[in-house]
Image (tube, grey):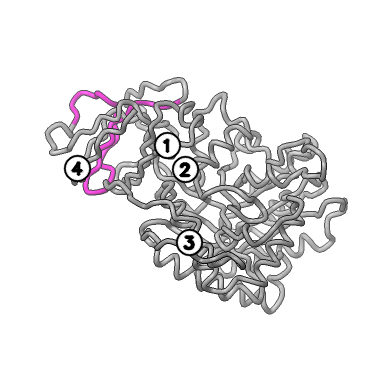
Amino acid sequence: MRYPDIPTAPRIALRRARVPLCLIESVPSTATWEQDAEGAALVDILIDQGRLAALSPSGQPGDPARDGGFVDVDLAGRQVWPMFLDCHAHLDKTQILPRASNPDGSFSGAREGSMADRLRHWSRADIEKRMDFALRCAAHHGVAAIRTHLDSHAEQAETTWEVFQDLREKWRGRITLQAVALAGADIYATPFGERLLDLVGEAGGIVGAFLRLPDGETRMPDDIDESLDQLFERAARRGLDVDLHVDETGNAASRMLERIARSALRTGFPGRIVCGHCCSLALQDARQVQETLELCAAAHVGIITLPTANLYLQDRRTGATPRWRGVTLVREMLAAGLTVAVGGDNVRDPFFPYGDHDMLDTLRQAVRILHLDHPIADAPRLSGPNAARLMGGLDLGSLRPGSAARLILFNARSLNEMMSRPQSDRLVLDRGRISAAPLPDYAELDALIPGRSASAPKENAP
């Protein structure tokens, strides 16, 4: 099925676009939306000077666009979505896989391989080259915003955060970039931790930490509550939000998520709290799960599930098949009233050796891994409106009259067709213009790989 021609015109009416209703902000109750079995409807989308002028059920009488100078484009029921958000990424690690091995595919192997690569290679030029490559991949696939965690060790933080701020400015208006300082929770009580908090504040960033009980240990650290209280108190004094790596382990004794929620309530933390991974919750008993989810709801903790990396790393044992999927309890969290989103996490690094910064690929896998179908109607929220909410209420991820028309057109008429093919022929229609951003060639990165000849083609402009 060939796409219709999309004109370059100030006013465009996309007729008979099929849109999941969960992606339309504040669907008018008075409108007659004829939903299909997947929770989508045929919608006419009016774009005026790059903004969404109106959304209405297709074929509605008294259409104001008929005499308004709009150029009609009949999409014949093809899916139209807002551009994606990736609310949890690691752009500083991306694309290091060819030179950074994970010998056994384990979490410890990933950590050691990543650390060795950082100490050996992470110069300003290296980080900038890889991060910009990743952003061009994301732009091609229709990603409009990314929150990246940045390894913020004492010897690395200044360089990485400078590169991030430069790229944030370079990509302003195309991809909204946010950054989280990734460090040990106890680092913030040290002199360097104070400097790191200043650095994060100056860059408009977010306070982060990794919190997990290593496999094999059964007792939570005696000082964990004090460390968490100090983290929240220091973040609150600077008016900073918090985004944490939590319980990324198959150890059921790892109950950091519960302790985080209790600390947030105890300290009265006023900012936003997001917790990623939360894998061990899936291995805990029903009583513990219920208590933790109630605490998270009370503390307004948002959750980001990272299904690709967790499926890859968790329960990995040499010579054995994994017995569980490694992901958290998404359905139970949604039922408890928590805001849950899906993130892309690592791409072509020792923590996850695959991926291409394509959030549709991530969502397709999430639907299968997490059983987000039956019904599937709300699944698109996890890479759109829910992600936007966890990223601070960005005006992205849903369709709303008056907002910028940042859309993706798919050659699929149903969510089943969307989930069954990679949709590599999608069209990104950004503010009324088809994006021509090509996928960058992997050969561009050859110069960063020791022993590989650098015969890279000329970079394509983003």
Residue at 74% across, 39% down? 282
Quick check: marks 1 and 2 in contact, CB under 8 Å?
yes
Please report whichever mark, 4 or 1, sits nearer to the chain's N-terminal start. 4
Alpha-carbon distance for marks 2 and 4? 25 Å
Q: Nearer the viewer, mark 4 or mark 1?
A: 4
Please report whichever mark, 3 or 2, sits nearer to the chain's N-terminal start. 2
Q: Position of residue 158 (x, y in %)?
A: 57, 76
Quarter of the image for residue 153 reads: bottom right
Mark 1, secondary structure of its residue: helix
The amino acid type of the residue labelled 3 equals: Glu
**Badge 4 is on which residue?**
11
Badge 1 density bin: few <14, some 14–19, many ≥20, Cα 10 Å:
many
**Badge 3 is on which residue?**
444
Please report whichever mark, 4 or 3, sits nearer to the chain's N-terminal start. 4
Q: Which span is picked out in magenta?
A: 39-63
The amino acid type of the residue labelled 1 equals: Leu
Q: Is residue 160 above or below residue 367?
A: below
Residue 328 seen by the camera? yes
Residue at 71% across, 65% down? 184
Please report whichever mark, 2 or 4, sits nearer to the chain's N-terminal start. 4
**Badge 2 is on which residue?**
384
Please state, as top left, top right, bottom left or bottom right, where the C terminus lies in the image.
Answer: bottom left
Residue at 58% across, 52% down? 347
Q: Is residue 132 left or right of residue 324?
A: left
